[in-house]
Image: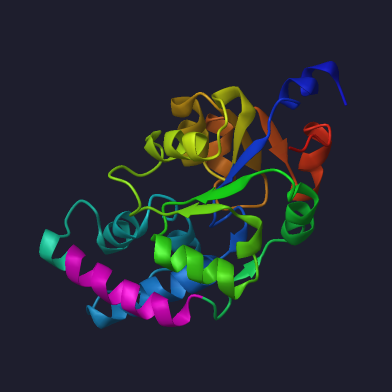
Amino acid sequence: MSAEDNRFSAVRALIFDLDGTLIDSKLDLALSINAMLKRMGRVELAHEEIFRMVGNGAPVLVRRALGAETVSDEEADAGLAYFLSYYRNHMLDNTVTYPGVREGLALLENHPMAVLTNKPVNFSRAILDGLGLSRYFRIVYGGNSFEKKKPHPMGVETLLRELAAKPEEAMIVGDSEVDIQTARNSGIWACGVTYGLGAEGLRSFPPDLMLDSLTELPAFLNGRTI
């Protein structure tokens, strides 16, 4: 480990994104979006196209899929309602943890950990429960937990208070530019993962640390626990 990497040794609180970071949910999201489009008489989209729309919460995802520039508020609301109803029943059909996530969380479990995602909070908690990950996280917040979603710092600022951590003692771990911007807006460290949905965005918004697997993170924290 280089001397520069010791800058993370003070980190004690870890804030994780969900989709693209802990869980590979992209197929269930794409299938749910296409079910919504079919229901509304729209042309279904290629899965890869939908994957690129993920990251800013369900309302934005639905608007993008319906055509953000042209869709009416009424159509967007109807699409969102159907999408959420469908996804609620299918969100664990194909969703799994990424390789190394379970092992990484087990190595980090002495750190206070939280999830901050733009996915609706009830869905997030249900998925974490279904995949057996809930026990690792003291707090789970979603896109509807606060007045503002990521990259607004509101969620991180709340978590810092609740985890009793200073900004320099906290790190967000995510897969997209939204997570890096959230870290910058909050004054905390930013860690990116290479395997998620937002690798292209991370090139434009480089994190302080980049990982191929969560199992690599403990070494950068010098094994520090509380």
Residue 77 location, quadrant: bottom left
Q: Quadrant of the N terminus?
A: top right
Side of 23 where 39 appears, left or right:
left
Q: Percent x, y for residue 166?
A: 56, 25
> Taken as a whole, is the magenta stretch helix, strand or loop?
helix
Magenta span covers which residues?
76-91
Residue at the right extreme, as displayed: 1
Classify 225 as above or below 63: above
Residue at 26% across, 63% down = 66
Q: Percent x, y for residue 181?
A: 47, 32
Inspect this view and state whether residue 74 appears: yes
Residue at the top extreme, as displayed: 3
Q: In which quarter of the image is the C terminus?
A: top right
Classify 197 as above or below 133: above
Q: Does the magenta stretch include residue 90?
A: yes
Residue 94 location, quadrant: bottom right
**Viewer-nearest residue: 147 or 119:** 147
Q: Does the magenta stretch include residue 25?
A: no
Residue at 31% across, 42% down = 148
Q: Percent x, y for residue 169?
A: 63, 28
Classify 76 as above or below 41: above
